Image (tube, rainbow, N blue to C red):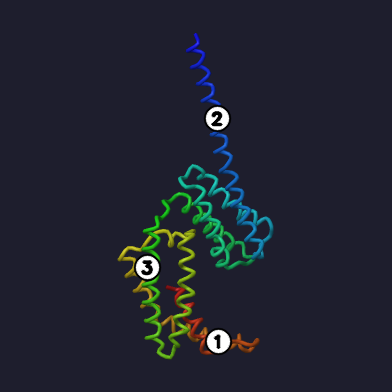
């Protein structure tokens, strides 16, 4: 009788502990999600878009729905951290206006980014390092090609612009919200990127003319750095953005 009583009591204690643990674990994930959404909301407020409040709520609800349906994903907390850290660059890169169709495009993009992040396997450190090395090699290739195409460019300014742009890529690799920063490129993809850079050589001539116009306007509006340094930096930055 004593043995049965002891067994029953042990089973009851185990059931209670299991319930407490499951409840505690279940309460952590919603808290993490709410803190992540609050951080995203705060970044939206710091750099507001000309959207009605209802649109902003829809944008946040889209993110909420994407991450709420993946609460059983492995490394869920790390995925939310990546979403939070990667959101700022994504948000700042949006072209925001009161055009509803453009808003819908942005909302579809963020939904896809979030769902892909929550559903795909996260890269290991070896994969991240390989991707960093690939970006470094591609950016060196592009900078050398750019100076060959435009021999008048100041090498120091080109290297400075390249380093700044590459640094931004490294930050996105650390928080890979955009799928392109999640996995290293295959050799075929590397060759495709180089071919695209070659194909855009005539477009870079038009870009140079555009940059000169932008720099002249900037100088007319107030003090500016050396026109050459300014235009060389802008050309490099905008060219690499198309890479």
Q: Are discs 1 and 2 less than 8 Å apart at CB?
A: no
Secondary element at tag 3: helix
| In front of the other: 121 or 56 | 121
Disc 3 + disc 1, Cβ < 8 Å = no
Q: Earlier in the sequence, mark 3 or mark 2?
A: 2
Q: Residues within 10 Å of mark 1 (few under 14, many from 20)?
A: few
Q: Which residue is mark 3?
A: 133
Residue bearing mark 1? 213
Q: Measured along the vertical axis of the image, is residue 100 above or below residue 239?
A: above
For mark 1, give the secondary structure: helix
Distance Cα–Cα, label 1 vs label 2: 67 Å
143 left or right, relative to 227: left
Splitting the image into 4 quarters, where does residue 166 fall?
A: bottom left
Would you name the residue on which mark 2 appears?
19
Q: Is residue 33 rendered to the left or right of residue 165?
A: right
Q: Position of residue 13 (x, y in %)?
A: 54, 24
Q: Nearest the camera: 125 or 26?
A: 125
64, 223: nearer the viewer: 223
Q: Is residue 1 above or below residue 74?
A: above
Residue at 49% in and 56% down: 113
For the point 39% across and 77% down, the residue is: 142
Query: Residue 28's quadrant in the figure?
Result: top right
The location of residue 110, given as percent across then percent down, is 53, 57
x and y, in percent, of residue 107 in the image = 56, 58
Q: Quadrant of the C terminus?
A: bottom left
Q: How many marks?
A: 3
Mark 1 / mark 2, whichever is N-terminal: 2
């Amino acid at each position: 009788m004593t043995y049965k009583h002891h067994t029953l009591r042990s089973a009851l204690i185990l059931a209670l502990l299991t319930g407490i643990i499951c409840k505690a674990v279940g309460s952590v994930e919603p808290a993490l999600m709410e803190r992540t959404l609050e951080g995203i909301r705060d970044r939206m407020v710091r750099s507001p878009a000309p959207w009605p409040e209802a649109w902003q709520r829809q944008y946040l609800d889209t993110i909420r729905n994407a991450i709420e349906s993946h609460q059983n994903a492995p490394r869920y907390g790390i995925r939310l951290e990546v979403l939070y850290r990667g959101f700022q660059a994504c948000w700042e890169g949006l072209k925001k206006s009161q055009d509803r169709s453009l808003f819908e495009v942005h909302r579809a993009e963020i939904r896809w980014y979030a769902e892909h992040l929550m559903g795909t396997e996260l890269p290991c450190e070896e994969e991240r390092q390989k991707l960093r090395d690939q970006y470094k090699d591609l950016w060196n290739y592009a900078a050398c090609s750019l100076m060959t195409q435009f021999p008048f460019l100041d090498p120091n300014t080109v290297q400075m612009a390249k380093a700044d742009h590459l640094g931004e890529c490294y930050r996105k690799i650390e928080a890979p919200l955009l799928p392109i920063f999640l996995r290293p490129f295959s050799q075929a993809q590397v060759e495709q990127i180089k071919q695209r850079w070659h194909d855009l050589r005539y477009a870079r001539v038009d870009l140079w003319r555009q940059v000169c116009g932008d720099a002249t306007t900037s100088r007319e509006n107030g003090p500016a750095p050396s026109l050459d340094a300014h235009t060389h930096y802008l050309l490099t930055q905008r060219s690499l953005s198309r890479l």
